[in-house]
Every structure is written in C-alpha cells, then in structure tokens.
Amino acid sequence: MQAATVFARPLPDGGTIGVAAPASPYESRSDVLRSVEWWESQGYRVKLAEHVLAQDDFVAGSAADRGGDLTGLFADPEVDVVQCLQGGYGSAQVIPHLDFDTIAANPKPFVGFSDITALHVAVRQRAGLATFYGNGFLGVGATETTDFSRERLLAVLKGGGAGEVPSNPDDSFLRTLRGGSVTAPLAGGCLWLLMQTFGSPWELDLDGAILFFEDYYLPPYYLDGILTQLAHAGKLAGVRGVVVGEMEKCDWGDLRQVSDWAR
C-alpha cells in the first residue's frame, strides 16, 4: 500500500547537502573532492555520512551501514538534501535496513539515479515521499556533466520540482509518439531495477501514474521482454502516460551489430 504523497521542502540558500553511498563505492578520492568543491562554489555545505568512503568489493560497505547512513541523514536536522554518492550496484540490499518512519517524518529531497531506482521505489511505496531522479553526488563534479544538468539540478531542488522542463541545448531531439495531456504522479527509473521490486513488500505501483524509464546496455529483446512482463503483471493497465528517457548504448545491447537480432 502506497502512503499519501509528501513533498519535500525546497533547498534553502546556504543549505547542507548530506551524502550517503548506498550502492557502489567511489573510485578516486579526487572525484569526491571535486564534487564537494562544486557544491561549496554554489554556496552550500556538504556533510558526508560516516561510511560514505567505505569500500567492500563492488559495494560501499555493509548493507546495514549504508542503510543506517541514509536514515541518519534524513534524521539529521542540519541536512537539507540527501544525495546519493552514485549508482552502480547494491541499493536494493539497503532497503531492509531503512527506517521508513524516520524518513516519512523528515521529508527532504532525495536525489540519485540508475541503481538508486530501487530506493526511489521503496521510499515512495513505504514513506510516500516524492523523490528526485537526478545526478548523484559524484555526477555534479564529473568533467563530462554538462552545465545544463547542473543548473537543472539546482533549479529543481531550489524550486521544489514544479514548472516546465526546458529543452536540453546539448540534445534537442524530443519526439511525441502519442500525444495527449495528463496530470499525474511520476513513477519509474531504470527498467532493470524496477523489475527487481516484483514480489517484494515495496513492489512497483504504477496505478494512476506517468511511467518514466531509462536504461543502459539493455538489448532490445530485453526491453521488449520487460515491457511484456509489466503488461502481463497488470502494471501498465492504470498508467496515465509514458516518458522514455535516454536508452544509453541500447541499440545493440550485448549483441554484435551484424546480428540478425538487431532488427
């Protein structure tokens, strides 16, 4: 059962960005420092959670520590925004270690994307908090991140997420497949992570929502299979609209470009 939607307060000037690492660990300390400097250059403080720099093979420390860090940042009165270090892998492991009552009682913008999809779904289902699908902490300092992405992140956090979405000057390709107008909650994320919620206490609920999705290196036949499963499970019956994001390197997926399957 999904809780009633709770909207987080906008990021105040000079506020504090709390950072936890629920998924993959950092690779270079300079990447972390670069992102700290970017936030500080915008007039904000950064507060790193206790285990944010932990490394345990392909995840950033134990699931209990990662979950405790996230809950702690929501409970911390000094923190205005909770931003995940990055995606990668491991977010779903953290869900049983979250205190959803604490999260619901302290609504704040929660930011991250890709693997963080698992947490977006669980927090929406269990705490009813409207979250933000956007750049992780390392993304704001990354050299490949565009000014448009950084500016949009700030504008959304400071403005509460309302308003028209401007066109991306670096990629103006945007097409309507089936027109219409609808007002509804947004729900979605990385398709592969959405499917991993099936059969769990926080299973994806799309009834009455606008579904948005993106993915990375997803073969076209996987995409078809996932959408088919969503339809068979009745998840698309109550969807009000669909937004398809960037399907990065999904043209061929795991197949050679000469493969007949590519058609």
Image (spheres, rainbow, N blue to C red):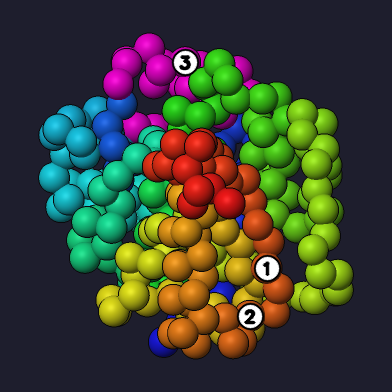
Disc 1 element: strand
Whether 129 is drawn above or below 213: the answer is below
Would residue 98 be seen by someone viewing this image from the given angle?
A: no
Residue at the spot 28% in from the left edge and 58% down from the top edge: 92
Give yes or no for contact between labels 1 and 2 (Cβ–Cβ under 8 Å).
yes
- Residue assigned mark 2: 239
- Residue assigned mark 3: 34
Instruction: Estimate the x, y position of residue 108 in percent, counting from the top left.
Output: 50, 55
How busy is the neighbourhood of tag 1: few (under 14 within 10 Å), some, or many (20 plus)?
some
The range drawn in magenta is: 27-48
Q: For residue 38: magenta?
A: yes
Marks 3 and 1, Cα distance to the nearest angstrom? 35 Å
**Disc marking residue 242:** 1
Instruction: Estimate the x, y position of residue 67 in percent, counting from the top left.
Output: 24, 53
Q: Amino acid at mark 1?
A: Val
Give yes or no for contact between labels 3 and 1 (Cβ–Cβ under 8 Å).
no
The quarter of the displayed image where residue 146 is located: top right
Q: Which of pointers 2 and 3 lies earlier in the amino acid sequence? A: 3
Q: Amino acid at mark 2?
A: Val
Whether 180 is drawn above or below 55: the answer is below
Is 32 on the left-hand or right-hand side of 191?
Answer: left
Q: For residue 80: magenta?
A: no
Whether 217 is drawn above or below 191: the answer is above
